[in-house]
Amino acid sequence: MKNDHRPVNVNPSDLAAFAWPVSALASITHRIAGVILFVGIAFGLFALDTSLSSEEGFQTLKDMIRHPFGMFVTWGLLSALGYHFVAGIKHLLLDMEIADTKEGSAFAAKTTILCGVILVFLAAVWVIQG
């Protein structure tokens, strides 16, 4: 029997069992936050159009945002924006060759995730109090 050392195809279910490095998790969540923001542009344009259409439209938008689902969407977009901003700064620092070693990248990723969690919490407090 021949000894075959070719790579094995990975199934999507295998990805959950893989031990992802923290820098990879930070990078992937940065991309996910970017996609959420891209989709959120549609909500933002809808909100702008509704709020500027008339006084009734503005009141309708306020009521929609104060609804629990509207608060959830607002929190989600603010959370994505906050994390994407922090992770973008991390990527800019990496582009300037700051923390581009394996250890530095791990520290930067952990710092990014910590700052992101803080911003997500602050966004929740702001939306709930708002």
Image (spheres, grey):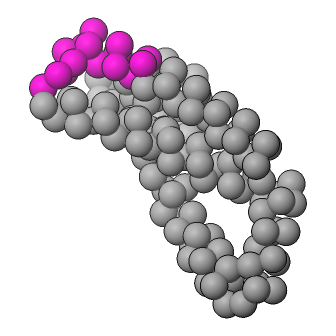
Q: Position of residue 113 (x, y in %)?
A: 49, 25
21 left or right of 72 in image:
left
Does residue 9 show up? no
Q: Position of residue 128 (x, y in %)?
A: 79, 43
Location of residue 4 by image quarter: top left
8 left or right of 46 in image:
left
Q: Is the magenta stretch mostly helix, strand or loop?
A: helix
Location of residue 102 by image quarter: top left
Does residue 99 show up? yes
The residue at the point 67 percent across, 80 percent down is 51
The residue at the point 26 percent across, 13 percent down is 104
Q: Does the magenta stretch include residue 100?
A: yes
The residue at the point 72 percent across, 90 percent down is 54
Q: Position of residue 31 (x, y in %)?
A: 43, 46
Q: Which residue lies furthest to the front in this view?
A: 55
Q: Which of the two residues, 42 or 49, is positioned nearer the viewer here?
A: 49
- Residue bounds of the magenta highlight: 97-111
